[in-house]
Image (spheres, helix red, strand yellow):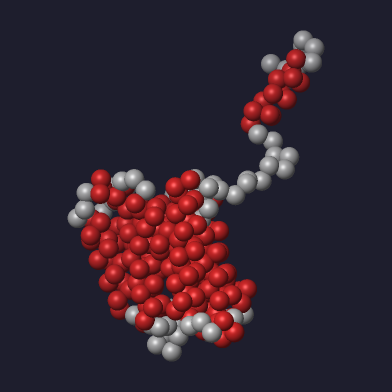
Amino acid sequence: MNETVLTPILDILDIVGIAIFALSGALVAAKERQTFVTMGFFALVTGVGGGTVRDLLIGAPVFWITDPWVAAVCLTTALITWLTPMRVWDGKLVDYADGIGLAAYAVLGSAKAIAYGVPPVPAALMGIITGCVGGVIRDVVAGRPSIIIQPELYVTAAALSASLTVLGMQIAGWLNQIDAVIWGGAFVAGFALRSAAIHFELGLPSYGGGVETASTTSEENSDHSENVSPGSGPPG
């Protein structure tokens, strides 16, 4: 970790986010009944994916290359998953845990970007990337639909935490607040929104501007076929 940038609080958020995302990656491999090596790979790429992209974009040293604890946390999480019956992880427990990691990583990514001199709007985007990209990589490698295209609020929760982090750090001096309070509030807000989305199945309206559905197309074809005279169709 870059000691001039990260504080103990952000260090904690970092480890929590890494462990939870690593768990979600390991569980994907477990549900597919993969080997421990594959499980460890999924845990690693999910745990460090978002932070790696962030660090490359803001010009920071890639965090898990310089910190020996990161890979150890991912592999330990994979080992715990390997030794644990799948029924332990049934239900929505993992979804809520993922929400913790999402909010933690969004706060961390934005705060680190601000510390590296990134302007506010790109810094907020770095928080979103940090929170979401690991899960995207996991889903793409696993060959399943990405979580970011599911109807429930997910990216929005990361955006809330990231935006509050950036906004709070910009006006921290004027509010006479320390960064730790801002980070904590941003984390709680993002996790609360994600938890509400999980519990109440909240989602943003989907695009519906003139998109033809399969049923509409079928009906139109049916109506058209009724108006065609016998013998006027394609040959054979």
15 and 26: which is toward the camera = 15
Res. 94 in view? yes
Q: Residue at x 29, y 50 (%)?
A: 89
Q: Residue at x 56, y 86 (%)?
A: 173
Left or right: residue 20 versus residue 185 is left
Q: Residue at x 40, y 62 (%)?
A: 100
201 and 123: which is toward the camera = 201
Res. 57 in view? no
Q: Position of residue 187 (x, y in %)?
A: 46, 67
104 and 45: which is toward the camera = 104
Q: Is residue 22 above or below residue 57?
A: above
Q: Which corner quadrant of the image does residue 16 belong to?
A: bottom left
Q: Position of residue 129 (x, y in %)?
A: 52, 67
Q: Is residue 98 above or below residue 183?
A: above
Q: Position of residue 126 (x, y in %)?
A: 54, 71
Q: Position of residue 61 (x, y in %)?
A: 45, 82
62 and 117: which is toward the camera = 117
Count of marks placed on residues: 0
Q: Residue furthest left?
A: 83
Q: Residue at x 34, y 51 (%)?
A: 93
Where is the N terminus found, in terms of image quarters?
A: bottom left
Where is the C terminus found, in terms of image quarters?
A: top right
